[in-house]
Image (spheres, rainbow, N blue to C red):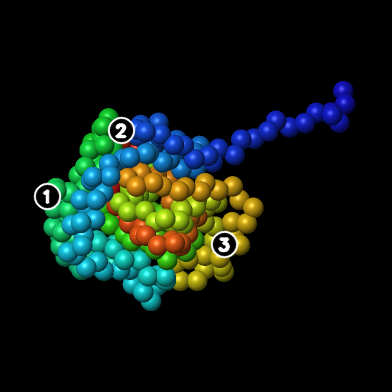
Amino acid sequence: MSTAHVSSPAVPTLFSTEVADRLTADHITCLAAGSVGSVRIRKFFNSGQCLEIMRALETYEMGNYDEQLVQPRIAKLGPAAYDFYGDGKLHDEYWEHAVQSTRVRSGLLDGNDPLAAAAKVLAQAWDDEVRPATSGGRDMFAGMIREINNGARMHFDEVIREFVGVLDQSPIAQIAFNCHLSTPFKGGEAVVYRRRWSPRDESQRDGYGYDRALVEGEPSAIVRADLGDAVLFDPRNYHLVEPVEGGGRRLTLSFFIGVTGRGPLCLWS
């Protein structure tokens, strides 16, 4: 029997952007399984909540990532594990910064904590607990507020690879969560590529970022968020943020979600 005219079935890319009005467990599961590129939840926070948080932030001067490592500058409230990791553990300064930052953030939403509001929605969607990730038995910080106006270089985030042994329970999947508290007139899109880190990529590394030539020709999910929208994706895929154009600010409430082999979700930044 001749097979000259037998073609192979098309293989789906499975890297679309899902848009919905309500977060569900299926969204989290599909991101963890790699069968969707990103998920955008419209109006995760309403405009009133976003404006209240932005007004409260006017009285607080945010810090930033280490500018020797992260360029362009990214302003933030709250510590990232990235800034305080060494010798296989988180330094003492991490825990001090976590306490101070949590205290500031806890009153930003009309005297309440926007992270608690976000975690409540996640718990309802997942139908299980949402709790802080732990390191050495101590609750880690989650819920940075970041301002990325000049873009963020292409990079990946993978806690079990970058910070070996820091989390007490290694997640089987990692999801990035960003709720947009302020949006620019143009630009600021998140771009996620269907391409993960490979050891050979290190030759294309500069600081924390990588050359975009690594993802040339790869499928991508490009997400433009409106005010209050939450964007979720797998940060183990290479991703970046485009610079803001035409004025405005791009601020998000940001954290990682760990999907564990058990029921609860865990959060950290």
Q: Could you tell me residue 74's position as x and y percent?
A: 35, 66
Q: Is residue 148 left or right of residue 106?
A: right
Which residue reaches farthest left? 111
CA–CA distance between discs 1 and 3?
42 Å
Q: Amino acid at mark 1?
A: Gly
Mark 3 in CB contact with mark 2 (< 8 angstroms): no
Q: SS class of the residue under badge 2?
A: helix
Q: Which residue is mark 3?
A: 212
Q: Amino acid at mark 3?
A: Arg
Q: Residue at x 26, y 49 (%)?
A: 50
Q: Is residue 125 above or below residue 185?
A: above
User: Looking at the rendered structure, which numbered label has been put on residue 111?
Assistant: 1
Q: Amino acid at mark 2?
A: Trp
In the rendered image, the quadrant that contains the C terminus is bottom left
Q: Residues within 10 Å of mark 3 (few under 14, many from 20)?
A: some
Q: SS class of the residue under badge 3?
A: helix
Front-most of residues 205 and 110: 110
Q: Is residue 169 left or right of residue 152?
A: left
Q: Could you tell me residue 119's position as x and y percent?
A: 24, 42
User: Looking at the rendered structure, which numbered label has been put on residue 126?
Assistant: 2
